[in-house]
Amino acid sequence: MPEYFDHAKTLADSLAASEHPLPEADVQQIILSGLDFAYDAIVASLTATVDDIMMDDFQAHLLAFGMRVEAQQAILTSQPLANSLHLGDWWAGYGYEVPVLQRAALRILSQPCSSYWCRWNWSTFESIHIKKRNRIQQEKFSDLVFVHCNLRLQAITQNRDRKCEPISIDEIDVSSEWPTESESSSLPLDDSWLDDLPFYYRDSCNKLIESLSEFCSWWWKGNDSNDGLVGRMLPLVVVALVVLWYTWMIFKLLSNKRIPVLPPGPRGLPLVGILPFLDPELHTYFAKLAQTYGPIFKLQLGNKLGVVVSSPSIAKEVLKDHDITFANHDVPATARVIAYGGSDIVWSPYGPEWRMLRKVCVREMLSNASLDAVYSLRHREVRRMVQDVYANIGSSVNVGEQMFTAVINVITSMLWGGTIKGDDGASLGAEFREVVNEITELLAKPNISDFYPALARFDLQGLQKQIKGMLLRFDRIFETIIEQRVKMGIEDGKGTKDFLQLMLQLKENGDGKTPFTMIHLKALLMDMVVGGTDTTSNSVEFAMAELINKPETMKEAQEELERVVGLDHMVEEFHIPKLQYLHAVMKEALRLHPALPLMVPHCPSSACTVGGYMIPKDTRVFVNVWAIHRDPSVWVNPLDFNPTRFLNEKRDFSGNDFTYFPFGSGRRICAGIPMAERMFMYELATMLHSFTWELPKGAKLDLEEKFGIVMKKARPLNAVPQARLSDSSLYA
C-alpha cells in the first residue's frame, strides 16, 4: 500500500500543477501532458532505471562534443553572420551566434518548438532576460543535464508529436544567458549528433496501458493481503475519483474555451436592463452606442436580449452568411395580432408556409406582368392627386398628407379597384387612412409584453386589445370586399383585374400541400395596406424635403423631366426608365432616410457566432441600416444630400451590397420592391414635373426625423406649389 500512495501522490501533484499553466500554454494540452508525466513516473519507478542509462549516454555525447569544440577555439575566425549560419537555423534572428554549450541547449529545447503539443517550451525562454553571466562550465553542463531529464529527449527527438512537460523558469537558466554582440563569433556548429542519439523510446499508448495495468495489479493483489475490503476497494475508489475529477476539469475547460462570449454593451439595472435609459430615437441612440461599444453590441431589454449590428461586414454575416439561421423575424405581440396570428409574409416563421406566401407575392401579385396589368388604376389615382394639388395652387400644402392619401388610394385601387368603384371606393380609402395611422402608432409603442414575454398573456398596457379592435374593423372591410368580388364572379373577365381577383383564383386553385387560405389572403391584404402606405409616402416626403432644401438639385431633376417628358405632357410610367438623375434622387433619399431604419428585427433559430461573439437563440437582432448608410468610412460626406454619388455607381436595391440595402437583404428582403420603386418614382416625378415647390414665406425647412416602426418626418412638410405645365387642361 505505501508504494501505491506514492504513485497516487505523483498523479495528484501533476493534476494540481496543471491548474497553473504558463501564460502562453494551451490548457487542454498541459492537462494531458501532466497526466502522461504521472504515468511515465509510475512506469519508471517500477521498471529499470532507464533515465540513468539515458543520462550517462547524453553526458558522454555532450562531453565529447564540448572537447571537440574547445579544440577548435584556437582557429576561430570572425566571419559575417550570413556566412556562418545553416539554412533554417531559427536562432539567426538574434543577429549574432550563440556560444557553443548554450546553442546545444537551445537546439535541444527547440526540438519540439515546431510541434503543436510543445510550443510553450520555446515561449518560456523567449520571455526571460539575461540573469547570469559568470557561470562555470560545470554549472552550464548541469543545466543541460536538467534539460535532458525534464524534456525526456528520447520522446522528443524520436517522435515530434509526442507530448512533453513545460519547463520551469526557476529551475533552468542555460538559455537565459543570451550572449552580447561583443562576444566573438564561432565556426558553424555541427550539432547533427543530436538527431542520432540512441535515446530510449516507448510508445505513449503502451506506457498508458502498462501503467494502468500496474494500478490494477494492486487491486488484484489486495485479495491476498491482510487489508481486507478496504485494501481491495481503496485503490479503485481513488482512481475512479481522480478520473472523474479529471474528466470534469477537461469538460469545463473545453466548454469555456469553445463558447464565445456575448458582445459588449452597456450595463443595465436588474430586471429592467437598459429600458429606463432608452432614447425614443432608437436609430440615433444605437449609432452613438456603437461608437463606444463597437459595430456589434448587446442590450438587455427587460427579460429579452437584444443585439445591434452597425457595420456592413457584420450585417453581411447576419443577412447572408447565416441567412437561414436569421431567417425568422422577432414578432411583437401587437404585430402577431394584426397579422392574423403571424400568418402574413412579414411575420410568419421561415418554412413551407412562408415560402408559399412569398411565391404568391413575388410571382403572382408583384411580378412585372401583374403590376403592368393594374397600371390604369395607378394612373387614375395619381391624376386625382394632381387635381387635388392644383386646386391649392399658391397655398400651403401638407405634402406628407397628400403623399399618404395618394399612396393609399393607389394601393387600395390595385388591391380591389376593379371590385369597388366610385364613391364606395373613396369612402373605403378614407376609412383605411384613419385606421392605418392608428395601427402604425400602436405598433411603434414600447410594449411590456415584448420585453417580458411571460407577461404577454396579461396585456398589461392594453395594446393587444386596442390593436385587436383595429383588426376587427379591417376584417369587416375585407369581408365586405371579398363578398362583393365573389358575387361578381372570380373569373369575371369584364373590367380591370385587381390583386383581390388574383388571390381568390389562387385560393381556388392553390397547392394542396400548402394551401392558400382565406386567412392568408386577408393577412396579405393587411401587409399591402399597412406595410405599403407609410413606407412609400414618408420616403417621397423626405425626398421632396431634401429637394426643396437644395433648389439647384430640384432644378436639375426638373430639367431632366422637361427633356424626357416635355411641359406639354403628363408623366407616364414608360418615361420612368429614362430618368436617370431622378433614380439617383430616389436612391439618395433612401440612403439618408431608409423607411425602416432598424429593419424588421431578426431572431436566430439557434445560437450562432457573429463578429466573433455568441448570439443566443431567440435574441432580438437589430441591423442599423440608418447608421451603415451614414458611415463616413463608406460614404464621402455622408450627411450631404448628393444624388450624383449614385450616377456612376452600380448600387441597387438587390441587397447584395451591404453598404446600401434600404429594402433589406437575404431571404427576408422586402417582397414589394418592384411596386415600391414604381410608386415612388411615378409620384415623385409627377409632383416635380407638374409643379414647382417652395417653402411658405418666412418658414424654415426642418429635416428632423422621428423614429417609429416606419421613419417619418418629425414635423410635416408644408410647401407652396406653382403650376409648371404649359397647358392648364392637363391638370383637369
Image: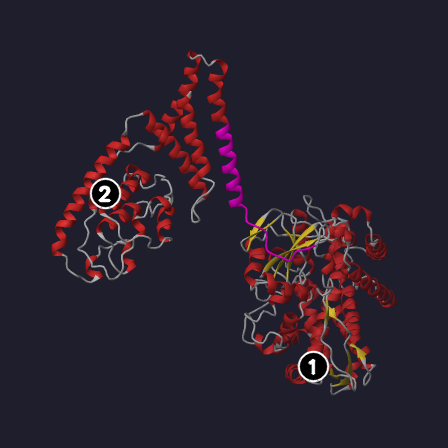
In this orientation, which residue lies closer to the viewer: 630 or 367? Answer: 630
Position of 132 with respect to 254 (left or right) is left
Residue 596 in the image, given as x and y percentages of width and height: 68, 64
Q: Amino acid at mark 2?
A: Asp
Query: Can you tell which mark lies on residue 632?
Result: none
Predominant SS along the magenta part = helix
Which residue is the site of mark 1? 549
Which residue is the site of mark 2? 195
Residue 78 in the image, given as x and y percentages of width and height: 17, 61
Q: Amino acid at mark 1?
A: Asn
User: Is 384 located above or below residue 528 in the figure?
Assistant: below
Q: Secondary structure at mark 1?
A: helix
Q: Is residue 265 magenta?
A: yes
Query: Residues at badges 1 and 2 in contact (C-beta under 8 Å)?
Result: no
Q: CA distance from mark 1 to mark 2?
A: 80 Å
Residue bounds of the magenta highlight: 241-268
Please report the residue visible at 62 percent of the width from the left and 57 percent of the height from the top: 265
Residue 359 visible to an observer of this rendering: no
In this orientation, which residue lies closer to the viewer: 630 or 88? Answer: 88
The local crowd at label 1, few if under 14, some if 14 to 19, many if 20 or more residues have their Cα within 10 Å, is some
Dot in front, 1 or 2: 2
User: Is 186 located above or below residue 143 in the figure?
Assistant: below
User: Is 14 located above or below residue 646 in the figure?
Assistant: above
Residue 180 in the image, given as x and y percentages of width and height: 27, 59
Q: Is residue 338 magenta?
A: no
